[in-house]
């Protein structure tokens, strides 16, 4: 029986980011060409994860960022989301 979200491929599914704490999460590299990379990890023995940052699609509906209070089963609206981004893993050097 498969366990977890790795489809039964124990040891092959990289869930490194699930234990990321609050606070500083990574750094953003902006190249002269405009290409933008989010770098996460790479310190304290954690593997470095690089994600390419691109504009997301514009939506025709309202989206909100909210703070969820799981103790009371409620949420507090923080702000409307005007833009979104898409993070894509950088595959260079992976294989």
Image (cartoon, rainbow, N blue to C red):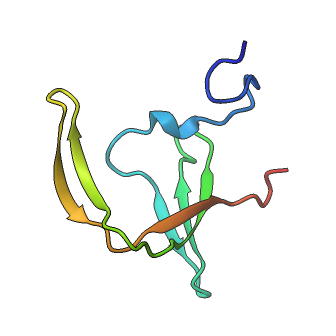
At x 71% / y 18%, what residue is drawn? 2
x and y percentages locating residue 25 in the rendered image: 41, 51
In the rendered image, the vertical position of residue 8 relative to residue 87, given as above or below: above
Q: Nearer the viewer, residue 4 or 49?
A: 4
**Residue drawn at (22%, 46%) of the image:** 67
Q: Quadrant of residue 63?
A: bottom left
For the image shown, how many numbered marks are present on the structure?
A: 0
Q: Is residue 51 left or right of residue 92?
A: left
Expressed as whole percent of the image width and height from the top left, the position of residue 92 reads: 78, 61
Q: Is 34 situated left or right of 11 in this image? A: left
| Front position in the image: 18 or 73 | 73
From this viewpoint, which residue is outermost toward the front? 60
Q: Is residue 86 above or below residue 17?
A: below
Q: Is residue 36 above or below residue 6?
A: below
Q: Residue furthest bottom?
A: 33
Q: Nearer the viewer, residue 85 or 73?
A: 73
Residue in view at x 54 percent, y 47 percent: 41
Residue found farthest to the top: 1
Residue 77, percent across and down? 18, 54
2 lies left or right of 93: left
Q: Nearer the viewer, residue 48 or 68?
A: 68
Residue 82 location, x and y as percent? 33, 74
Q: Which quadrant, please, contains the N terminus?
A: top right
Quadrant for residue 65, please give it.
Answer: bottom left
Above or below for 87 versus 29: above
């Amino acid at each position: 029986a498969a366990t977890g979200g790795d489809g039964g491929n124990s040891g092959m599914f990289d869930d490194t980011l699930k234990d990321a704490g609050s606070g500083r999460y990574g750094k953003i590299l902006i190249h002269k060409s405009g290409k933008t990379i989010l770098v996460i990890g790479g310190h304290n023995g954690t593997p470095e994860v690089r994600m390419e940052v691109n504009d997301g699609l514009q939506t025709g509906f309202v989206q909100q960022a909210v703070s969820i209070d799981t103790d009371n089963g409620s949420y507090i609206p923080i702000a409307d989301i005007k833009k979104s981004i898409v993070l894509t893993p950088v595959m260079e050097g992976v294989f």
